[in-house]
């Protein structure tokens, strides 16, 4: 998973957000998808478990979880080192 974040202003340390905090938030979100059969998850009760849909779900979850001053620019989910799908608004 690749995440691009943005902010209109940097914080007092000159960052959009500390990578350690971002990694923790992402870890909590993707933890529910790790080593499970995606077809059995409520997220995919109606949606197909495509890489595109997974990118959108991760995008939406990040958008709800991040501090209000930090925006999600794009989420890319990779199936392999050369094949992935991105979601952005």
Image: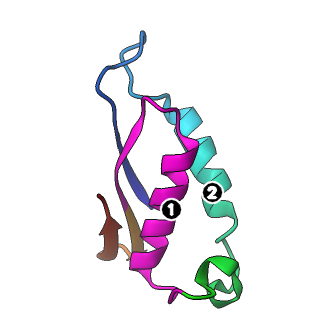
Q: Mark 1 points at which residue?
A: 58
Residue at (48%, 48%) from the top-left corner?
63
Rendering coords of residue 70 (x, y %): 42, 34
Q: Give the range drawn in magenta.
A: 47-75
Q: Residues within 10 Å of mark 2 (few under 14, many from 20)?
A: some
Circle 1: element type: helix
Q: Mark 2 points at which residue?
A: 29
Rendering coords of residue 40 (x, y %): 71, 88
Left or right side of 26 for 87? left
Report the front residue among 56 and 3.
Answer: 56
Residue at (62%, 77%) from the top-left corner?
43
Give the quarter of the figure containing the N terminus: bottom left
Check the image and name the residue furthest to the top.
Answer: 12
Left or right side of 14 for 50? right
CB-based contact (under 8 Å), mark 1 and mark 2: yes
Residue at (67%, 53%) from the top-left corner?
28
Report the front residue among 23 and 5.
Answer: 5
């Amino acid at each position: 998973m690749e995440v691009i974040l943005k902010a209109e202003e940097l914080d007092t340390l000159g960052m959009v957000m500390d990578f350690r905090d971002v990694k923790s938030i992402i870890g909590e979100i993707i933890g529910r998808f790790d080593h499970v059969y995606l077809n059995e998850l409520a997220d995919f009760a109606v949606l197909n478990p495509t890489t595109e849909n997974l990118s959108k779900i991760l995008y939406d979850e990040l958008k709800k979880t991040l501090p209000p001053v930090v925006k999600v620019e794009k989420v890319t989910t990779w199936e392999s080192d050369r094949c992935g799908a991105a979601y952005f608004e």
